[in-house]
Amino acid sequence: MFSLFYGLWKYMLSKMEFHVLILGIDKAGKTTLLEKLKSQYSNVEGLPPDRIVPTVGLNIGRVEVSNTKLVFWDLGGQPGLRSIWEKYYEEAHAVIYVIDAACPSRFEDSKSALEKVLRHEDLQGAPLLILANKQDLEDAVSADELAQYLDLKNWMREFIHFKLFQHSMGKQILLLGIKESVNWLVDAMERSKRTDMLRVRAGSSVV
Ligand SMILES: Nc1nc2c(ncn2[C@@H]2O[C@H](COP(=O)(O)OP(=O)(O)OP(=O)(O)O)[C@@H](O)[C@H]2O)c(=O)[nH]1
Ligand SMILES: [Mg+2]
């Protein structure tokens, strides 16, 4: 009986599209991450880093990870563009927040932008994945150091599904990093009450 329900549940999830917002301040590496995700998980070859320009609108990437359809929304992180982020919160199943771990002078900006994201009620219950990016650079701080700086324990009560990964676009470990992160995210979204809530709201029991 259990396997019947489990199979049905898996089938329903496979029909769903999960919307994942990629946020973070400008130059954190969001679009570079998106292009890597495309290269890694779809037939579309992502743009090489030297062809990526600062984002002004919205970049979208659709990929499939072990039968789960993911739609990534990558938004611009320049100060004047951050007010647009909240327009996407309501429909988002999860958030990836990217931080340039090699640029301490911008940690404060990054932290306050993250706190604003976390405080927003439209994102309640959304799994949050924080990437301590650019680990290939010499000045990069570790994920643990960054977590301490961000004082994340305060937020963990509300964001039960929460994880911080070290990440880098520059080295071989990157691919493992991406796979680990995406697997964690898919699992967190599949278990999240927010996913149930969004499915009910969309009126799609089995689409
Ligand atoms: N060394 C290194 N450079 C990176 C990494 N990820 C991104 N970059 C570089 O960081 C710069 C900014 O990357 P983007 O992906 O455009 O950053 P973004 O967060 O999308 O920036 P906005 O669109 O302005 O919000 C580019 O020069 C990238 O090549 C990384 O892991 N390591
Ligand atoms: Mg960008």
Image: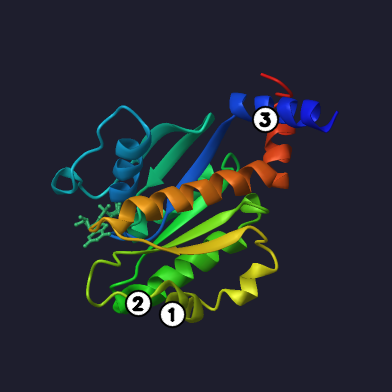
From the image, tell me which residue sits under label 3. 10
Horizontal and vertical percent for residue 10?
67, 30
Residue 73 falls in which quadrant of the image? Answer: top left
Q: Which one is earlier in the sequence, the residue at label 1 or at label 3?
A: 3
Q: Is residue 33 left or right of residue 158?
A: left
Q: Residue at x 54, y 51 (%)?
A: 184
Horizontal and vertical percent for residue 83?
45, 53
Horizontal and vertical percent for residue 172?
26, 55
Q: From this view, report whether residue 200 is shown above or below residue 161.
A: above
Res. 29 in view: no
Q: Is residue 167 left or right of residue 171?
A: right
Which mark is on residue 145? 1
User: Disc 2 to disc 1, how far (Cα)?
Assistant: 6 Å
Mark 1 vs mark 3: give the one in front.
Answer: 3
Res. 173 in view: yes
Q: From this view, report whether residue 196 is shown above or below residue 82.
A: above
Type of the residue with mark 1:
Glu
